[in-house]
Amino acid sequence: MNQPFLYLYLVILCSIVYCTDGCNLSQDVIKDIQSYQPIVNNIIDLVTKGNLKGKLYKDLALFVDKFGSRLTGTKNLENSIDYLLELMKSYEIDNVHGENVVVTRWRRLEEYGELLEPRRDTLPVMALGSSIGTSNDGLEAEAIVVRSFDELNQKNISEAAIGRIVVFNEEWTNYDDVYAYRSQGATEASKKGQQTYRDNVTKIPAATISKENAQMLQRIQDRGETIKIRLNIKTETLENGTSRNTVGELVGREDPEHVVAITAHTDSWDAGVGAMDDGGGAFMSIYSLIILRHLGLQPRRTLRTILFTGEEQCYCGVNDYDAVHREELKKFIFVMESDEGLWNPLGLNYTAGEKGGCILKEILQLLKPLNATRADYVENVGSDISLWTKSRIPGASLMNENGRWFWFQHTDADTMDVMDSDQMDRAVAVWTSVAYVIADMELEFPNEFQ
Ligand SMILES: [Zn+2]
């Protein structure tokens, strides 16, 4: 068969079995999903033009102005959780309650850095979460700059690193790779100072400096000049405390036992006010329920918002939820997490099997009015929910234009001015629509892990 005929043949075949992107969902399923277009349009209209336009931004601003940062283990976080519980109750969300969780408690007390050689200047530093402090008098040493773990492991550099401050000036590639320097940098550097105690890595303090200063130190070293730094870091690890996961739901009208979960986290680091990470995600998760309430929509299955606590420090909230709700989790059909920004939405990143992926692609077609129709498979979705999406429950996170996320994450710059009211409205419209359709459509979302 020559090519034009082959193409025609495929087109005819495709139109017979309704295939798009290699999917062959039954016509009933496609029709059922398409029947939600008027509801999705109502959701979009309500938040982008109607009564709720701009409300998500305004209410998040009120929240972060009132409470500021929400470090795990603080009274402030607990007060903010009380506030969110009351907020949900005021909109008559079902079964609003907190669930106690034991959390670790770390906090920073003081931190100061100074460049001593080749010239004197302050060197802004921020201790990494769970880092130990320096001795009371601080720490003064020459520094060595490396671009990677591989470079640190070269024999001459390993030897030169002993007794020095190691500065990682790693290049940005992607979060997972670069995160390794944040999470493993101190361990890798400590091994160099402990050549004879390899099994027993001593804890050494770890702190971040700005990218600009890391590059400056690299240039100074490349010129063959000596770098000397003074650090004074004081942190404290307290006894475990109690926090709460924050839960509310719209009980399913026909099949309440099966649950679609909409999640985010309430806690933040102490830098900035956690407007973006993850105040925005928490408010979007609550507002999805509020929007549906506003429209008088009660889904077939239960839609449950779970705002985990202690994500930043220990994943304490999700781990506790997993242990306590082990049996019930078998009836979770889909989990969603918003912890990667609420900028202009593009669609979803998801982890699901082939059929699940096809269903999501079809659902995302409903978001054409917002041009947010992408559904991209990713190996593993989410932060808290990755506990489940790796092997147990299909799930998704919001794909959005979040290229600036890492400019602000876990820094003093995580404030309201990184948020955009119109983009947040569009994001919550996508989030609410997807959650509702999955919870309400006739076909139960397939769990292809089982
Ligand atoms: Zn987060």
Image: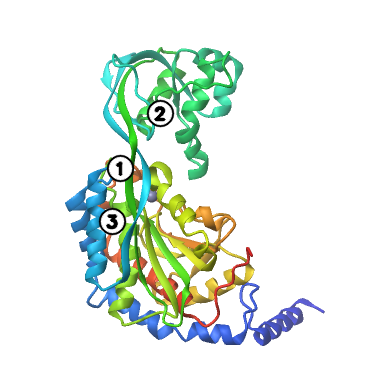
Report which residue position mark 3 lands on.
419
Q: Is residue 37 visible?
A: yes
Q: Is mark 3 on a helix, strand or loop?
A: loop
Q: Position of residue 149 (x, y in %)?
A: 55, 28
Q: Position of residue 228 (x, y in %)?
A: 36, 14
Q: Is residue 309 visible?
A: no
Q: In which quarter of the image is the C terminus?
A: bottom right
Foreground label between 1 and 3: 1
Distance, label 1 to label 2, CA atoms, is 35 Å
Q: At 37% across and 49% down in the image, what residue appears?
A: 101
Farthest right residue in view: 1
Q: In the figure, residue 28 lies in which quadrant?
A: bottom right
Q: Is mark 2 on a helix, strand or loop?
A: helix
Q: Of the two numbered discs 1 and 3 on the same chain, state the one appearing first in sequence.
A: 1
Residue 73: numbered disc = 1
Distance, label 1 to label 3, CA atoms, is 26 Å
Q: What element carries label 1?
A: loop
Report which residue position mark 2 lands on.
215
Foreground label between 1 and 2: 1
Mark 3 Cβ and ligand 1 under 8 Å apart: no
